[in-house]
């Protein structure tokens, strides 16, 4: 199947899955929540969403492997690999708080081919392919061109492993609080990368994510003119460990600030 045909199928799948999430949210009860680790939750909604996505993606591209958050399918070295977060922003979902989203990306070898994120609360469908612009609900999007740190609107992510990350997070907040236009913690990495791609924010910093959290959003951000790197400015961000995402203009300045606090991680 051609990449553009696949893209159309994945866009439809993301919107349909997002509708499932919104419908389930209406009757969702807290006693359905299970704990994966300290403060890291899941429910039948994440798992069912993943099963629906995996089933459809298998029909679309039977030869592809999978890297998925809830582990219902696997990667064993296939040339093609789907990276799926069936519900990014689980804690938001549990508390009926925005944003939360569906995130699906396709990788061939080492190169991301397409990324689709459906942000359920604002009904925003973001997408890009390796050689297309980035789009939000059919309109081309671009990162902001703001280059003054003092005015920058910055998203932070707090990894679940608080013991390990507390010193690093404290250091980052100490460096940025009062020196940037605003700091926010929205709780859905994939949606936040898309907000950055749409020019709503200037940067996002998080010290530990999964590859499923960032695969689609990173491609969308890059195709919107933004930059993504690990905390040394390199490419290991693909693993999800250490992700600095920005409009490009503030990237190097933020890398310097992050490096001041790296040893605390
Ligand atoms: C989480 C969200 C959150 C980020 C965490 C992720 P989940 O994903 O993206 O914003 O800070 O590191 O694990 O658990 O809601 O899919
Ligand atoms: Ca996630
Ligand atoms: Ca998730």
Image (cartoon, rainbow, N blue to C red):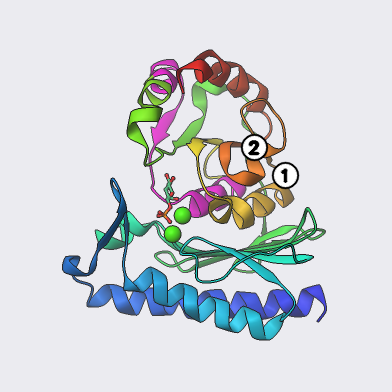
Q: Is residue 245 left or right of residue 48?
A: right
Circle 1 SS class: loop
* Residue at x 69% of width, y 78% of height: 8
Q: Quadrant of residue 161?
A: top left
Mark carried by residue 225: 1
Q: Image height check: is 3 above or below 109?
A: below
Element on which disc 2 rests: loop
Residue 67, position in %: x, y? Answer: 59, 62
The furthest residue to the front:
76
Residue 14 visible to an observer of this rendering: yes
Q: Residue at x 64, y 40 (%)?
A: 237
- Residue 107 highlighted magenta (yes or no): no
Q: Is residue 204 above or below residue 262?
A: below
Residue 136 versus residue 117: which sits nearer the camera?
117
Is residue 181 in the magenta section? yes
Quadrant in which residue 182 is drawn: top left
The image shows residue 126 at horizontal and vertical percentages of 60, 63
Q: Residue beneath label 2, please?
A: 247
Q: Which residues are magenta?
A: 171-198
Crowding at mark 2 (Cα within 10 Å: few <14, some 14-19, many 20+) = many
Foreground: 261 or 205?
261
Residue 185 x %, y %: 38, 40
């Amino acid at each position: 199947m051609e990449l553009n045909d696949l893209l159309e199928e994945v866009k439809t799948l993301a919107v349909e899955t997002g509708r499932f999430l919104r419908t389930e949210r209406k009757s969702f009860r807290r006693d359905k929540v299970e704990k994966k680790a300290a403060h890291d939750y899941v429910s039948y909604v994440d798992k069912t969403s993943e099963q629906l996505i995996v089933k459809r993606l298998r029909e679309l591209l039977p030869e592809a492997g999978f890297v998925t958050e809830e582990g219902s399918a696997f990667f064993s070295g296939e040339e093609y690999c789907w990276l799926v977060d069936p519900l990014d922003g689980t804690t938001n979902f549990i508390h009926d708080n925005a944003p939360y989203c569906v995130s699906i990306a396709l990788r061939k070898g080492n190169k991301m081919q397409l990324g689709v994120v459906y942000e359920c609360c604002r009904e925003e469908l973001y997408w890009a392919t390796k050689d297309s612009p980035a789009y939000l609900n059919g309109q081309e999007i671009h990162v902001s061109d703001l280059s003054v740190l003092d005015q920058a609107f910055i998203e932070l992510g707090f990894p679940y492993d608080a013991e390990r990350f507390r010193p690093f997070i404290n250091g980052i907040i100490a460096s940025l609080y009062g020196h940037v236009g605003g700091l926010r913690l929205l709780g859905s990495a994939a949606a936040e990368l898309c907000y950055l791609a749409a020019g709503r924010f200037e940067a996002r910093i998080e010290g530990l994510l999964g590859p499923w959290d960032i695969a689609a959003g990173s491609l969308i951000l890059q195709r919107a003119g933004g930059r993504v790197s690990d905390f040394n400015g390199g490419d290991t961000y693909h693993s999800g460990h250490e992700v600095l995402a920005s409009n490009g203009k503030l990237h190097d300045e933020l890398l310097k600030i992050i490096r001041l606090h790296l040893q605390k991680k």
